Amino acid sequence: MPSVPPPEAAYDRMRLRQWAHGTARSAGIERRDLLRLVAAASVAAPLAGLATPAQAASATATAPGIVKPLPPEVFTVRGTNAETNFAALRETGLLTPAERFFVRNHTVTPRIAAADWRLRVWGDGLKGPAVEFTYDELRALPSVTRTSFVECAGNARSYYATQQGQPVSGTAWTLGAIGTARWRGVRLADVLRRAGITRHAVDVLPRGLDGEVVSDGINLGHVRRPLPVAKALDDVLLAYEMNGEPLPPDHGHPVRLIVPSWVGIANIKWVGDIEVSAQPLVSPWNTALYRLFGPGYPAEGSAPLTRQTLKSAFELAPGAEFPAHRRQLLTGRSWSGGAPVRAVEVSTDGGTRWRRARLRDEPRSGSWVRWSADWVPGARGPAVLLARATDRSGRTQPNVAVHNTQGYLFDAVVRHEVRVV
Ligand SMILES: Nc1nc2c(c(=O)[nH]1)N[C@H]1C(S)=C(S)[C@@H](COP(=O)(O)O)O[C@H]1N2
Ligand SMILES: [Mo]
């Protein structure tokens, strides 16, 4: 029997139908350009910059447009982005220090002074005219704190190519396009209510103050992605602090969205305005991008992506070496954008035998859980380590992820190659 879809999913299907019939409003981009983008999105391209471990080690410690230092032992630079090396999380606690948090920039980190910043809330989903908030006004509102990961929808995308032999396009992340932080800010719901949101509002569209994005000769405008009001009024934050400090420039200073459990793109950094709309909105980031395309999906793609999926990673470098016959403590993390992780199993023989890892945190939704397992490596030579998580809904990471051309939501068990020496 089919399960009852959550209102979120039903809403997205409705919006998708409206988009297909041309009744959704495209915010700031020509409809024909959007259609061109959607057509291009359904074709997989070779992964640019798929780093082998050797290339990764020699990556320079600079990415154009990222402000913070990117020491090569902590980060692998991929274009305008910086991936956290999972081995560099081994000494960190549940929270990822800002200095080790991955960066995904469509363009360049802008430098914005909190004193000059304004948030403009506007649109036909409000009772009256636009309302502006200064940084101080935002800080004066009741604050909430919440631990949440931010994870790119394309995290682990490179394994479609390297583990499954399937072409995908986009940044060739391994597993490190994720970090978990304690965010403090105000509820988006409080700001929307103060701005006079009406019950006719269906979508809100937060937009970044970073530069306009040009892709294949089409100007996509500023980074922005519609968020259904149901989510916007639920658990979304306008965050101004990360792990007890003001947001650093690369992570959205002075204010960003935190959209718990959802795809990274929903967490708009350097937010400057939010449109509140009484009609469904579309932007490149919920039409041609962040949908699933490929065989098995409709031509216009799946419904826009919402929640992240289930994944596990060892806190080890690729090709890590272990002395034979000496007890090792393997450590790693598992996380889910759906039901919290229930159990993690580890295999040290390529997937033949599995045993339970010890969970070191109480699993919570929207966060990750650290785990560990003992291992006494046997014979010298190559070995393959695997970790697989099961969530409280009973879902277990599969051996193979279902392919989509842009390589989103990879959820299969990753084969981590090591050497016993
Ligand atoms: N304004 C703006 N917001 C943005 C982005 C961006 O380039 N510009 N990138 C998005 C993507 S794709 C991801 S995965 C997350 C990454 O957040 P982080 O760089 O703080 O890790 O920010 C999202 N918010
Ligand atoms: Mo992302």
Image (cartoon, helix red, strand yellow):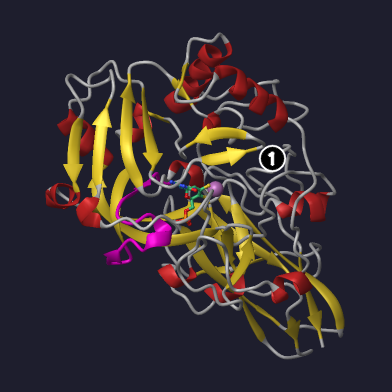
Residue assigned mark 1: 406
Left or right: residue 379 versus residue 19 is: right
Tag 1 secondary structure: loop
* Span highlighted in magenta in the image: 242-260
Which residue is at the front of the view, 123 or 217? 217
Left or right: residue 135 versus residue 279 is: left
172 in the magenta segment: no
Which residue is at the front of the view, 224 or 15? 224
Left or right: residue 122 versus residue 99 is: left
Q: Quadrant location of residue 32?
A: top right
Q: Where is residue 164 drawn, in percent x and y?
A: 82, 49
Q: Residue at x 21, y 37 (%)?
A: 191
Amino acid bearing label 1: Gln
Q: Residue at x 56, y 59 (%)?
A: 334
Left or right: residue 200 versus residue 47 is: left
Q: Against 121, is 173 above or below?
A: below
